[in-house]
Image (tube, rainbow, N blue to C red):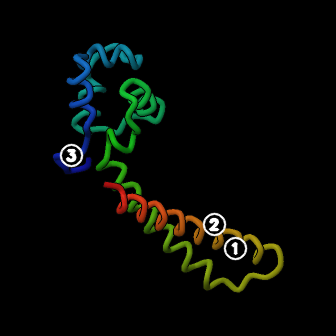
């Protein structure tokens, strides 16, 4: 469970729409409001298909509906990516394996450059 008062914005979007938890559940294919309640309180993370349903209903990206869950996953991925990069950079592979490693490292660099560009645009926006 993710501990944060901003763990989920699902409830505020649902209330703004005027939908009850039961009505939202029905729209997503649930027979009752229980799962929606658990998703709002982040007692459980919605399956991908349901998360995409929330996004489709409210026209808000999943990462904005569940920012705490997104940040936790992003941080975990970044940590593992850093570990992978260190392992790849220390590799002494040759031939095709070395080419695969080089491609992965290039992708990682391009990914970092995209992130830096994205951050600089975000900082310039009013």
Q: Position of residue 69 (x, y in %)?
A: 33, 48
- Give the quarter of the figure containing the C terminus: bottom left
Residue 48 in sight here? yes
Callout 1: 10 Å neighbours few (<14), some, many (20+)?
Answer: some
64 shown above or below 120: above
Q: CA distance from mark 2 to mark 1?
A: 10 Å
Residue located beneath label 3 in the image: 6
> What number is the disc on residue 119?
none
For the point 25% across and 16% down, the residue is 19
For the point 22% across and 24% down, the residue is 16
The residue mark sitting in front, 2 or 1, is 2
**Tag 1 or tag 2, which sits nearer the N-term?**
1
Residue located beneath label 1 in the image: 101
Q: CA distance from mark 1 to mark 3?
A: 39 Å
For the point 50% across and 74% down, the residue is 83
Left or right: residue 12 compared with residue 95: left
Residue located beneath label 2 in the image: 107
Q: Position of residue 82 (x, y in %)?
A: 49, 73
Q: Position of residue 38 (x, y in %)?
A: 26, 32
Badge 2 marks a residue whose secondary structure is helix
Callout 3: 10 Å neighbours few (<14), some, many (20+)?
Answer: few
For the point 26% across and 15% down, the residue is 22
Badge 1 marks a residue whose secondary structure is helix
Residue farthest to the left?
5
65 shown above or below 85: above
Badge 3 marks a residue whose secondary structure is loop
Q: Position of residue 6 (x, y in %)?
A: 20, 46
Left or right: residue 84 compared with residue 93: left
Residue 57: name its quadrant. top left
């Amino acid at each position: 469970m993710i501990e944060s008062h901003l763990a989920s914005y699902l409830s505020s979007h649902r209330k703004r729409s005027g939908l009850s938890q039961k009505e939202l559940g029905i729209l997503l294919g649930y027979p009752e409001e229980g799962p929606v309640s658990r998703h709002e309180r982040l007692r459980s993370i919605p399956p991908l298909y349901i998360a995409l349903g929330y996004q489709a209903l409210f026209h808000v990206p999943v990462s904005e509906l569940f920012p705490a869950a997104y940040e936790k996953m992003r941080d975990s991925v970044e940590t593992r990516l850093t570990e992978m990069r260190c392992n790849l950079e220390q590799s002494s592979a040759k031939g095709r394996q070395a080419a695969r490693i080089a491609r992965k490292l290039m992708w990682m660099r391009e990914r970092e450059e995209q992130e830096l560009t994205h951050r600089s645009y975000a900082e310039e926006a009013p």
